[in-house]
């Protein structure tokens, strides 16, 4: 009887694992199509996915809402976070940007934490074209906390984000080596934390190692 129960349990777990894998493939395919056709045209679908707990969709929405509407000129038709957002116009909504970044951060998204750090440090995400200027009080200590939390090099990305690792642009939830460098600057200048030159140097070293690792994965170096 016990053996039969164990066999049934293994079968159930196998079915569950297969269902999760199929769901991951479906999500990856859906998010890729959204990325290729543009956020604005698929906003409702992105909201549905984000509100159902899809972390990549949360980060994607956070980025979209952190960008001001832009002119559809040839030079600026590509967002820094996508290779194909030809007709993307930013959502320009700081409340929704913070809402979705925070939701993704609560689910452990490293770059969502990093973006929240940038918002509280600089009042904008300067890494994107036409960044929205957030009308919030800057807070170096809170920014430092978010940057510190974002150091998760072992973070396991989704199938969608792993597929985009060879891209020069991050769209979904991932760990960014920029966290190391921003934290190093804060330790160097004493912003939000006491000055610590040794800590700053160590963070820069880790950041450079991660940077070279990413370059190797993308095929820029052998």
Image (cartoon, rainbow, N blue to C red):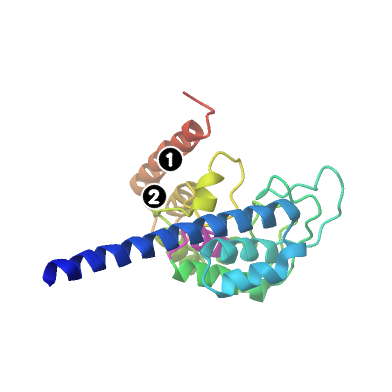
What residue is shown with label 2?
153
Read off the magenta span: 108-119
Seen from the viewer's position, the closer of residues 65 and 118 is 65
- Residue 160 numbered tag: none
* Magenta span contains residue 12: no
Seen from the viewer's position, the closer of residues 144 and 151 is 151
Return the x and y of residue 81 as percentages of the image width and height. Answer: 65, 50
Return the x and y of residue 93 as percentages of the image width and height. Answer: 71, 72
- Residue sitting at x 48%, y 34%: 217
- Residue sitting at x 48%, y 38%: 214
| Most distant residue in the top direction | 222
Q: Main secondary structure of the magenta part?
A: helix
Seen from the viewer's position, the closer of residues 178 and 216 is 216
- Are the residues tagged 1 and 2 within 8 Å (C-beta)? yes
> Is residue 57 toward the left or the right of residue 141 in the image?
right
- Residue sitting at x 50%, y 47%: 162
Q: Quadrant of residue 83?
A: top right
Return the x and y of residue 38 as percentages of the image width and height. Answer: 74, 56
**Camera sees residue 39:** yes
What residue is shown with label 1?
210
- Residue sitting at x 46%, y 23%: 222
Please say if 53 is above or below 80.
below
Of the two numbered discs 1 and 2 on the same chain, state the one appearing first in sequence. Answer: 2
Look at the numbered disc 1 and give the secondary structure of its residue. Answer: helix
Look at the numbered disc 2 and give the secondary structure of its residue. Answer: loop
Give the crowd class for mark 2: few <14, some 14-19, many >=20 residues within 10 Å.
few
**Camera sees residue 134:** no
Seen from the viewer's position, the closer of residues 94 and 195 is 94
* Magenta span contains residue 113: yes
> Is residue 51 toward the left or the right of residue 135 in the image?
left
């Amino acid at each position: 009887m016990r053996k039969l129960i164990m066999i049934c349990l293994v079968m159930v777990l196998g079915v569950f694992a297969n269902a999760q894998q199929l769901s991951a493939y479906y999500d990856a395919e859906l998010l890729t199509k959204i990325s290729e056709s543009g956020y604005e045209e698929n906003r409702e679908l992105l909201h549905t996915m984000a509100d159902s707990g899809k972390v990549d969709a949360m980060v994607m929405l956070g980025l979209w809402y952190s960008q001001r509407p832009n002119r559809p000129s040839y030079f600026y038709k590509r967002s820094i976070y996508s290779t194909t957002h030809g007709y993307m116009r930013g959502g320009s909504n700081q409340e929704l940007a913070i809402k979705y970044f925070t939701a993704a951060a609560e689910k452990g998204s490293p770059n969502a934490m990093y973006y929240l750090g940038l918002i509280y440090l600089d009042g904008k995400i300067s890494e994107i074209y036409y960044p929205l200027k957030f009308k919030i009080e800057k807070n170096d200590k809170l920014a430092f906390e978010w940057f510190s939390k974002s150091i998760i090099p072992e973070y396991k990305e989704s199938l969608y984000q792993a597929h985009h690792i060879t891209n020069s642009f991050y769209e979904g939830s991932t760990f960014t080596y920029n966290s190391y460098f921003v934290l190093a600057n804060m330790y160097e200048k004493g912003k939000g934390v006491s000055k610590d030159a040794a800590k700053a140097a160590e963070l820069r070293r880790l950041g450079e190692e991660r940077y070279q690792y990413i370059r190797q994965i993308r095929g820029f170096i052998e």
